[in-house]
Image (tube, rainbow, N blue to C red):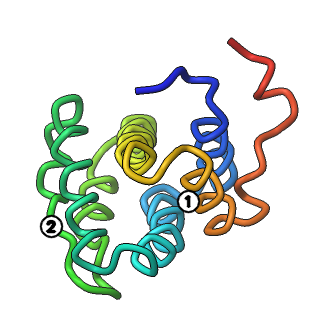
């Protein structure tokens, strides 16, 4: 994984910080537009493979994520993830979702490159992908 201060990780942190009170629903709101953009590039099967691999890797830290590995077609694509996140304390659920997003985008960046992955995040999340000016100066 890249250093915590990478632009992509800062974008993820900024996006996850926006709807802090939304819990599992807010987490899914981060995944849905991202999925739409990725599916446009690699298709449903490509997205499902990337997502399943990301869940597998993140489950080493949060074993309960393993039940979220399957990625059924929309609109229920993230139903298992939502249930799993809702079943854990908010701080733990946020940490698991962050790790899952970081892992997913790490894999994606290794395949298509950092600049394109960052642009996809910015396109998918719009203004929610803008890190605060102060975030970039932290170690």
Residue at image position (82%, 38%) is 132
- Placement of the C terminus among the 4 image quadrants: top right
Badges 1 and 2: C-beta atoms under 8 Å apart? no
Q: Which image quadrant: the N terminus? A: top left
x%, y% of residue 4?
56, 23
Q: Would you place residue 37 above or below residue 64 in this image?
A: below
Examine the image and state in which quarter residue 88 appears: top left
- Where residue 19 sits in the image (x, y, percent)? 65, 56
> In front of the other: label 1 or label 2?
2
Q: Mark 1 vs mark 2: which is more N-terminal?
A: 1
Say whether residue 117 is left or right of residue 57.
right
> How dense is the environment of label 1, judged by Cα within 10 Å: few (below 14), some, or many (20 and up)?
few
Which residue shows up at 26% across the image and 48% down it? 54
Q: Is residue 87 above or below residue 58?
A: below
Relative to the observer, which residue lies in front, 132 or 50?
Answer: 50
Residue appearing at x 48%, y 25% in the figure: 2
Furthest toward the right, the residue is: 133
Q: Where is residue 31 in the image (x, y as percent from the top left)?
A: 46, 65
From this viewpoint, which residue is outermost toward the front?
112
Q: Which residue is at the front of the view, 100 or 23? A: 100
Task: Classify residue 117 as left or right of residue 65.
Answer: right
Q: Name the residue under label 1.
A: 22
Q: In which quarter of the image is residue 40?
A: bottom left
Q: Where is residue 64 in the image (x, y as percent from the top left)?
A: 16, 44
Instruction: Say which element carries label 1.
Output: helix
- On the image, which quarter does residue 80 sit in? bottom left
* Residue with the mark numbered 2: 70
């Amino acid at each position: 994984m890249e250093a915590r201060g990478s632009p992509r990780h800062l974008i993820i942190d900024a996006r996850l910080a926006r709807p802090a009170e939304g819990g599992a629903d807010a987490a899914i709101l981060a995944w849905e537009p991202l999925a739409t953009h990725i599916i446009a590039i690699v298709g449903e099967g490509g997205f499902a493979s990337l997502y399943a691999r990301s869940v597998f890797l993140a489950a080493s830290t949060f074993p309960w994520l393993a039940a979220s590995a399957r990625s059924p077609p929309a609109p229920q694509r993230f139903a298992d993830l939502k249930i799993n996140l809702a079943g854990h304390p908010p701080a733990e659920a946020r940490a698991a979702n962050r790790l899952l997003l970081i892992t997913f985008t790490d894999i994606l960046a290794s395949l298509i490159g950092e600049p394109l992955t960052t642009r996809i995040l910015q396109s998918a999340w719009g203004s929610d992908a803008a890190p605060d000016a102060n975030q970039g100066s932290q170690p």
